[in-house]
Amino acid sequence: MVSGIETFETEVLIIGGGVTGTGVMRDLALRGIHCLLIDRRDLNAGASGGNHGLLHSGGRYAASDSETAAECRQEGDILRQVAPDCIDDCGGMFIAVEGDDPGFAERFPGYCEAAGIDCESLSPAQAREREPALSDKLFAAYAIPDATVDPFRLTLENVNHAQQLTDSLFLPHTAVESFEIANGVITGVLCRNTKTGGMRRILVRQVVNAAGAWSMDVARRAGCSDVSLLYSKGTLIISNTRITDRVINRLRPPGDGDILVPGGTVSLLGTTSDNVDDLEDIRPTVAEVERVLIEGTAMLPCLEGTRFIRAFSGVRPLLLPAQNTADGRSASRGFTLFDHRDQGLENFATVTGGKLTTFRLMAEKTGDLVARRLGNSRPCKTATEPLPSGNAVRWTEPGFAPRFWYRRNDPTDMILCECEMVPQSAIDSIIESAPGAESEMTLQAIGVRSRVGKGSCQGSFCSIRVTSHLYDRGVYDSARGLHSMRDFLSGRFKGVQPILWGEQMPQIELSEALHCSLMGLDRLDGKANDPEKEGSG
Amino acid sequence: MGQGERYYRTELAIIGSGLAGFAASVFALARGIASAQVGNTGAVAYTTGYLDLLGSCRGLWLDDPWQGLELLRESEPRHPLSRIGRTAIQAAFDQFSGALTEMGVGYTAPAERNHLALTPAGTVKPTLSVPQTMLPGIEARKAGVRTLIIDILGLQGFSAKEFVANIRSSWPQLSTAKLSFPDMESGGQVFPEVMARALEVSSHRERFAERIKAALGDARLVGMPAIMGIHHPDRVHAELQRLVGVPLFEIPTMPPAVPGIRLREMFEQGFPAKGLTLVPQQKVKRLVLEAGRATLYLQDSFGEVMIESKAAILASGRFLSGGLTAERGGVREALLDIPVTQPESRADWYRQDYFDPLGHPVNRSGVEVDSSFRPLGPDGEPVNHRLFAAGILLAHHDWVRQRCGAGVAIASAHKAVEAVADMLKEQ
Amino acid sequence: MKSTLAYKESVIDFKAKADELLPEGASYDSCLNCGLCSSGCPASGLEGMDPRRFIRMAMLGMNEELSTTPWVWTCTQCKRCMYICPMSIDVSLLVGLARGAWPEDKKPSGIVRSCQAQLLDSGTSAMGLRSEDFIEIVEETADEVRQEDERFKDIKVPIDKQGAYFFVNQNSREPAAEPEELAPLWKIFEYVGADWTYASKGWAAENFCMFTGDDEAWKRMVRQRVDAVNDLGCKVWVNTECGHSFYTIWKGVERFGLRANFEMGSLVSYYAQWIREGKLPVNADWNTGGIKFTLQDPCQLVRKSIGDPVADDLRFVARKLVGEENFIDMQPCRSANYCCGGGGGFLQAGMKEQRHAYGKRKFDQIMTTQAGYVLTPCHNCHSQIEDIGGHFGGDYRVVHFWTLICLSLGILGENERKYLGPELAEVGL
Ligand SMILES: Cc1cc2nc3c(=O)[nH]c(=O)nc-3n(C[C@H](O)[C@H](O)[C@H](O)COP(=O)(O)OP(=O)(O)OC[C@H]3O[C@@H](n4cnc5c(N)ncnc54)[C@H](O)[C@@H]3O)c2cc1C
Ligand SMILES: Cc1cc2nc3c(=O)[nH]c(=O)nc-3n(C[C@H](O)[C@H](O)[C@H](O)COP(=O)(O)OP(=O)(O)OC[C@H]3O[C@@H](n4cnc5c(N)ncnc54)[C@H](O)[C@@H]3O)c2cc1C
Ligand code: SF4
Ligand code: SF4
Ligand code: SF4
């Protein structure tokens, strides 16, 4: 063994900690298989942490792709059964406003019927009674069974369950660098610990590439040239409060800013769709926010005066057509599973594309392939086996932490994030036992596993309180705690920057003063902390 | 007095009760100008308590702020501090810190060099004048004195361990202890303000001092979060030191924190006694400038308040305080819609990196003034000869990154009051 | 995660109400989460709550919790949070709404009973004192004054005097429990020659209906009083030394759009005016021992109503009465003053432990002044400050202004010194 290299061994290595990768992990664990899941950053660092959270009824695709629409509907029904904790079955509406094509509106119920989607026609008055925020320029409306889903909760529960079942393991900040291949079989995967810079070797029997938009890159590292992707960036904005009870879709072929999705106590408006060449440093821009907002305002005029607290972007991988796919199905199904046999590899599979809504099905198909390859004949159970919840994975649900805290009624359990009312006990349980918990846990990692930093102050106060708490608990004992705070705030700012106007301006001004004038976080590097040596003299 | 009878007539109306507004009141009172002041809670309520003149220029920390001002004059001639002479700035700071001291919150007199003041994160920042309650810590770090840092059970956002972990490299001889505050031992949340008020009572001081003594060990100095009284910090500080037997000092904390509340309340409670007409915690709804007067209209739940004056100083701060508002299409001045110098479009307001050492372009937006600090209208001429402007509302500075918040506020207030005095004399 | 739709009908939607009732830019949506409100609120920490948390819970849709937390009865609706908030966000308004939504039988019975008592009789007394009894007590007491003090042998205590300049209201506590305390105020009116009257209808000062959160009852109460003043054709409704009654009436008139053909004023402002005019030649000569006094600004009168002008009047009167050097302000004071914890019906709510915890800040403030007496023109403040003094072991007394005014003028009767210490028992007799 080469010194300095950590070695791990597993039956199946899964690359990519999004809903797909974690879904595969749980699927396999339910078949009794041990997995190791890695992500170069953390859970939901890709599209799974940057999406709309819409559990599609299928209405959206009814016109263009009735097969996908039906798939969404079926998967939605399954998830409602097995993961009720992750879902807000709020219902949805499609609405057309002045200027939209009346013909499309008229044809819509027919499309839905073809895909088996319930669709109730509403008069404009009925629609506005249900959702008073809707524009009075509305002329057609249909109710459809849309819902929302919390992707963070999904991934956390997937991993948590897999850990329980087969002691499967999740390793954050572990990026695939290269594959050790002998005779068409991958025997080991070399990864870099992106936090420490050290190397990790993972000895494997099977490898699943679920790296989403990055799966082309990962496949190429394994010598496979069959995965060929385009990238489409989508930007969304989050309001400070929940604007509608239901999902509101614009009744027209998909375009910018045409869906407003409630996310617990907030709403998300999106999304844009622009092809990009580069996956790194994806960030929302002012221009994108303007586009989304102008379109959204046509449906919901109140958006004009709404306080937005953040924007974010995700990247959808788009599969180039005419691929050799595992089950020979066309890309119209939304996702593709590659078995890479024609690339000369026996134990490598790539699953990419698809939706959050259909992640379970993607995992099932992938699980079937991998289990077969391992000689495991147990069937997939994810369609019937409910996702168990656990103490450390409940904190991403908006409103859960405050209700928990309120019921518990323990005055010593201080609230650290006041916006989202996340108590100390939540942070403690996350540091101790959330999937991917480690000894020196960063604020970002805590943020992924809770609502910390997601409220209107966007972490400006709670970052300070949580950091102090972490120092107090001994999680940090060096300047790294402050650096982690700074990184966390820089990360948040990416999303905050394009929505800075109106009521968010006083907030950011206060934040900047806090973080620079009070805490000195803009001067952490180099000699800045020891200014005597640097004075202008 | 019944409803709707609140009407004041005065020489100078000061709009804003941040550092600039209060400094303007100090200077106006000293000159015997009858003044009225209005304003709500603003940036100053969150301050560290340090009075920065200029801590950073061209990205460098400044040891000598006065020399820094020279550099600034060359590189940023439109910066408010570049438009005020050194002697005036010095006089303004002397007078202002002196007034604070006289009102019960002792400040160090501004000297030639910046202090390197302590922050709750265990970092340090260059600043010119510091509260006396915070001074011993700044000096102890320089001398490397063995010091105990305490934090308090239930006080959020302040960890002695955090402070020590981050400052250790320049101040190795530190120990930590967590104390509970008398009568607040439950482990629930405690606010610095509440402890500070409690420490104004002698029995609490005595009990707290006992706890500090018990934790002292071989430390020769004790640092603690800023909780040594709101109204008589110097007295509380002296009393506690006497009881503990070693020098003590305060470290500022995150909001809601004592230093800002202290300043706000000191002004609010102290100024009326000095003859200032203060309409506290209210905002001007309308400002009408006419031939012979400037009239401020306010509205509280009880009814209308009117202030008629000969001159007005606009010291209404930035976004946090409501002096400026940011619409999607641009930045505006809130009261009179005075033109605001600003970046081309919203996309240019902020740089990508939050902590970019250059700061953000929108921070430099603000109101333009003439040489008498009269705000300029669209035609480049003063909006009105009775209207002056002061404070961080002005354009061409980035007080957060340049560590010049108090500097801009105090110096520009001085300048504006001088100009007001000239104007009043002419009449 | 369940849909939030289900229970929306049954409980208050606090966020929506805030948007509806609070001014633009000062609604919950504008909150910066800075915590200044909570830091400065004496009810913070009680029942695990504080004003910022109230706002956050509203924003997070925790309507059930907000509708049921007993904290709403510990918030005295003193509006200090709003005063301190950079965005001027008012928490107390929705606290009132939450109170109102409590089932009648779950509300603190003391407040409810007080309000019910007020609704029973046209006198509107919260202590259940009926008008005929009030009139009888007033007349008996007036007779005693006439007999005891030669100087006041002709003192008039008019009732229902048509067209009197001042319509004076009266807190029920004096007639019901300590009638001898009525006399000092009458003597002052007599001294300055005020044209005043009590009324047989709507004479009582207190208004606990507002504190039950029952807007209808509050309105009824105010309407009865407004009608009573209108009927008598008085110019000024003058509020006695009682903080909340002043707020409830002017606010009630405004809120319910009632027509009041009169002005509303506080007795304190008139004390100040009469002293300035030389009609009340008070001085501090009696205070030979240099007894120190501090002052409680009733929030209902100062912060929630007239603001600093009346706080200035209070100080002007107090300084004249006790001597410049013997007056020590609590800090903070005037509009920034802390509520003592007696307001909002807290005294009647039966939540003693919480009320004491709330009052601890007031107690500390008083102790810092080292004053021997606390002056306050508010009955709730008076009771609460006395009570916390007893509870925390404070060595001070609480007095009304009228006591000191009469003391200073040498017209305070021997039996009107209940609230004075032994050192003042003989002064000026
Ligand atoms: C803007 C937007 C809105 C959307 N809205 C919806 C919606 O409303 N409803 C819906 O059903 N679907 C929606 N989707 C689609 C949905 O989000 C995705 O289909 C889904 O999240 C994909 O999950 P994944 O796990 O396949 O990929 P990802 O979540 O992208 O996960 C890939 C992971 O791989 C990791 N990785 C990459 N390279 C490496 C490496 N070398 N080593 C280790 N790890 C690596 C990444 O860090 C990342 O975490 C949306 C997508 C976008 C972009
Ligand atoms: C977190 C934080 C840390 C800080 N740390 C430091 C520090 O270390 N050193 C330092 O020197 N300074 C510090 N400051 C304070 C800051 O520098 C000063 O508050 C600021 O420079 C004073 O500027 P000002 O008076 O112009 O504006 P502000 O303090 O913003 O005051 C503006 C005033 O105008 C009022 N106003 C606005 N509109 C109206 C209207 N229509 N009518 C009436 N009044 C109105 C507001 O209510 C407010 O009272 C800090 C501030 C913050 C927020
Ligand atoms: S003071 Fe105002 S802005 Fe600050 S937390 Fe309280 S309500 Fe919010
Ligand atoms: S009204 Fe008074 S008691 Fe109620 S929350 Fe505000 S400050 Fe606290
Ligand atoms: S009891 Fe006194 S201090 Fe408290 S609310 Fe009433 S008037 Fe205010």
Image (tube, rainbow, N blue to C red):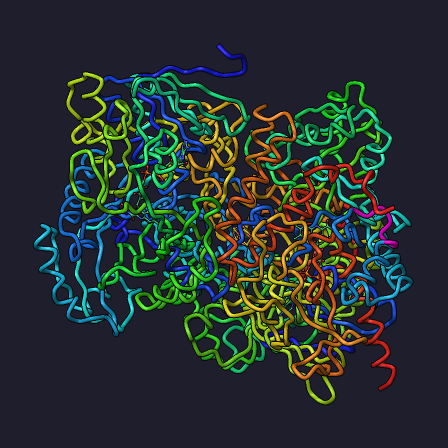
Name the residue nearer the viewer: B374 or B199: B374
Name the residue nearer the viewer: C111 or B277: B277
Image side of residue B177 versus residue C82, left or right: right
Is B62 magenta? The answer is yes
Q: Residue at x 69, y 24 (%)?
A: B177
Q: Which residues are magenta?
A: B61-67
Counting from the top left corner in percent of width and height, residue C165 is at: 58, 80
Image side of residue C261 versus residue B307, left or right: left
Q: Is residue C143 visible?
A: no
Image side of residue A68 versus residue B148, left or right: left
Counting from the top left corner in percent of width and height, residue A428 is at: 48, 27
Counting from the top left corner in percent of width and height, residue B289 is at: 68, 84
Name the residue nearer the viewer: B233 or A32: A32
Quadrant of res B174: top right
Counting from the top left corner in percent of width and height, residue B154 is at: 59, 33
**In which quadrant is the N terminus of chain B drawn?**
bottom right
Q: Is residue A211 above or below residue A201?
A: below
Image side of residue A121 versus residue A239, left or right: left
Quadrant of res B392: bottom right
**In which quadrant is the C terminus of chain B drawn?**
bottom right
